[in-house]
Amino acid sequence: MSVYTILVYDTLSERNAGVLRTCRKYLHHMQRSVFEGDLSSAQLVRLRADIGAHIDASYDHVLVYTFPPGAAPERQSWGVADDRPHDIL
Amino acid sequence: MSVYTILVYDTLSERNAGVLRTCRKYLHHMQRSVFEGDLSSAQLVRLRADIGAHIDASYDHVLVYTFPPGAAPERQSWGVADDRPHDIL
């Protein structure tokens, strides 16, 4: 069973690249520090451990929202059309 | 009828303060560029117009997720305990 996941990170800039790379292994890149995607419970556990190895838990902060199947949110984009290159498949 | 709303902005730094101030009028501040809260449809329309007046729509980007009543997501915080001062009521 998968859960739809939105992740937003707020990390010291020197750690951003590592966190970005980690998130990209699991999720789609939506905006500078925002990722989305479907994860199994096991993947979510692995993502948390993987991110834990890249952040300083005394300084950095990662917000993770999860939704039960079928409850994915409606998304609106305000401002620039999201035509910048990223890794959405 | 209210919709639960998550907003994440990615704006040029010189415009961050105005966007932050605008979001604070409508939502709770969860993380650097992340806000949450319940909005009526009318408030969501006003928020969009208000933000539109503060961003450069050819450069800035604001992601807005909305949920039907009762479908608010589960939230996890990874990393630092969120004990920094902010405006959650």
Image (cartoon, coloured by chain):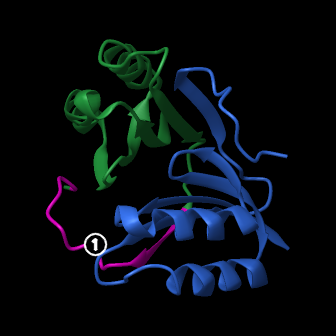
Chain colours: A blue, B green
Q: Which residue is mark 1?
A: B82
- Amino acid type, mark 1: Asp
Residue B72 quadrant: bottom right
Report the side of B68 relative to B79 (left or right). right
Quadrant location of the C terminus of chain B?
bottom left
Report the side of A36 relative to A64 (left or right). right
Image location (x, y in percent) of residue A61: 38, 70
Residue A13 quadrant: bottom left
- Tell me which segment is drawn in magenta: B74-88
Above or below, B81 against A26 in this view is below
Image location (x, y in percent) of residue A50: 61, 83
Q: Secondary structure at mark 1?
A: loop
Note whether residue B71 is visible.
no
Kindly report the secondary structure that dominates the magenta region of the rendered protein.
Answer: loop
Image location (x, y in percent) of residue B56: 39, 16
Tell me if mark 1 has few (under 14), some (14-19) or many (20+) residues whose alpha carbon lies within 10 angstroms of its own. Answer: some
Q: Residue furthest front?
A: A14
Q: Does the segment drawn in magenta span residue B76? A: yes
- Decide which of A17, B59 is in the foreground and name it: A17
Q: Which residue is pictured at 38% across the width and 15% down the height?
A: B52
- Decide which of B48, A85 is in the foreground and name it: A85
In the rendered structure, the residue with mark 1 lies on which chain? B
